[in-house]
């Protein structure tokens, strides 16, 4: 199954690295959308179908935690999995985000294998739920 | 600072595949290079800022290694600076958790990248907040400034 994936990070470098890791790990991609912060990501979600979101925490305009909280308020986290990719995920912060509905956390630096593992786990759960 | 030094080298190696070693700043030939600086602040259980200064010439290699490209494929200054900032960003999270623990509460602010003038370089060369490194044969300075 090919996925429509949204990458949310203010660093173009990180978005490129995640794209490459997805490609190298063999994840099938139907569409790859990009956003530089949480607000831009919400704008993308207004117009595009997305299956999975990879999101940073530290971003200008709207950070990752606010973005996740906004998605939670709008009831979007139940159907649209969010995975946090960051180096700022302390244990209490990750626990707080998972309590809101974030599916998983990937610590930077990461490998393509780690990206694949999370996609399989998160999207496998989503597919089994269907 | 020993823990910080080790963590800096560990993360830079993982992220950029560049190998480094601590080097006394007096042994670094800082005047032979033009440097750029990435700096970012953080707040929470630990508050302060982290900085890394490297020669302009190695920013293409840093970006290429992070992105899995050849250095000649990195033709945009913006890409080089963004990659340097991202390297510092990743180092920063690990350094804070190394110092305060994985249960630390902290927020990272976005890194800023800038050219380094002679006065800034002189200051970094003598400040107790900075450490010297050799990174793939190039000089590098890494600084940690804590509030309070």
Image (cartoon, grey):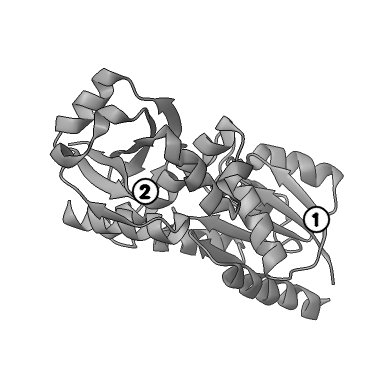
Vertical position of residue A109 compared to residue B27: above or below: below
Q: Are tags 2 and 1 found on a single chain?
A: no
Q: Cβ–Cβ below 8 Å for labels 2 and 1?
A: no
Pointer 1 chain: A
User: Residue at (57%, 58%) from the top-left corner?
Assistant: A84
User: Badge 1 is on which residue?
Assistant: A50
User: Residue at (74%, 69%) from the top-left corner?
Assistant: A27
Q: Residues within 10 Å of mark 2 (few under 14, many from 20)?
A: many
A7 sits to left or right of B54: right
Question: Front-most of A80 and B29?
Answer: B29
Q: Position of residue A79 (x, y in %)?
A: 76, 63
Residue A110 visible in the shown view: yes
User: Badge 2 is on which residue?
Assistant: B92
Q: Quadrant of the C terminus of chain B?
A: top left
Q: Position of residue A13 (x, y in %)?
A: 59, 45
B127 sits to left or right of B92: left
- Label 2 residue SS: helix
Kindly identify which numbered label has been placed on residue A96: none
- Label 1 residue SS: loop
Pointer 2 chain: B
User: Residue at (64%, 39%) from the top-left corner?
Assistant: A36
Residue B45 visible in the shown view: no
User: Residue at (15%, 44%) from the top-left corner?
Assistant: B24
Q: Residues within 10 Å of mark 1 (few under 14, many from 20)?
A: some
For marks 2 and 1, give the CA distance: 31 Å
Quadrant of res A38: top right
B88 sits to left or right of B125: right
């Amino acid at each position: 199954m090919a996925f429509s994936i949204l990458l949310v990070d203010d660093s173009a470098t990180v978005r490129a690295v995640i794209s490459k890791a997805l490609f190298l790990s063999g994840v099938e991609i139907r569409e790859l959308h990009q956003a530089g912060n949480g607000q831009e990501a919400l704008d993308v979600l207004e117009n595009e179908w997305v299956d999975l979101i990879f999101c940073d925490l530290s971003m200008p305009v709207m950070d990752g935690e606010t973005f996740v909280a906004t998605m939670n308020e709008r009831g979007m986290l139940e159907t649209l999995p969010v995975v946090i990719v960051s180096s700022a995920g302390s244990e209490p912060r990750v626990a707080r985000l998972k309590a809101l509905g974030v599916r998983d956390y990937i610590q930077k630096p990461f490998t393509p294998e780690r990206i694949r593992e999370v996609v399989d786990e998160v999207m496998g759960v989503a597919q089994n739920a269907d | 600072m020993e823990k910080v030094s080790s963590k800096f080298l560990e993360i830079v190696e993982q992220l950029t595949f560049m190998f480094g070693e601590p080097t006394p700043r007096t042994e670094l030939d800082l005047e032979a290079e033009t440097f750029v600086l990435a700096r970012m602040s953080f707040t929470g259980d630990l508050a302060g800022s982290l900085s890394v200064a490297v020669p302009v010439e190695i920013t293409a290699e840093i970006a290429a290694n992070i992105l899995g490209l050849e250095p000649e494929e990195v033709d945009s200054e913006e890409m080089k600076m963004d990659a340097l900032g991202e390297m510092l960003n990743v180092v920063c999270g690990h350094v804070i958790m190394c110092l305060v623990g994985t249960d630390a509460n902290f927020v990272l602010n976005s890194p800023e990248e800038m050219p380094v003038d002679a006065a800034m370089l002189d200051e970094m060369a003598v400040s107790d907040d900075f450490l010297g490194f050799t990174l793939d044969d190039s000089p590098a300075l890494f600084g940690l400034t804590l509030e309070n």
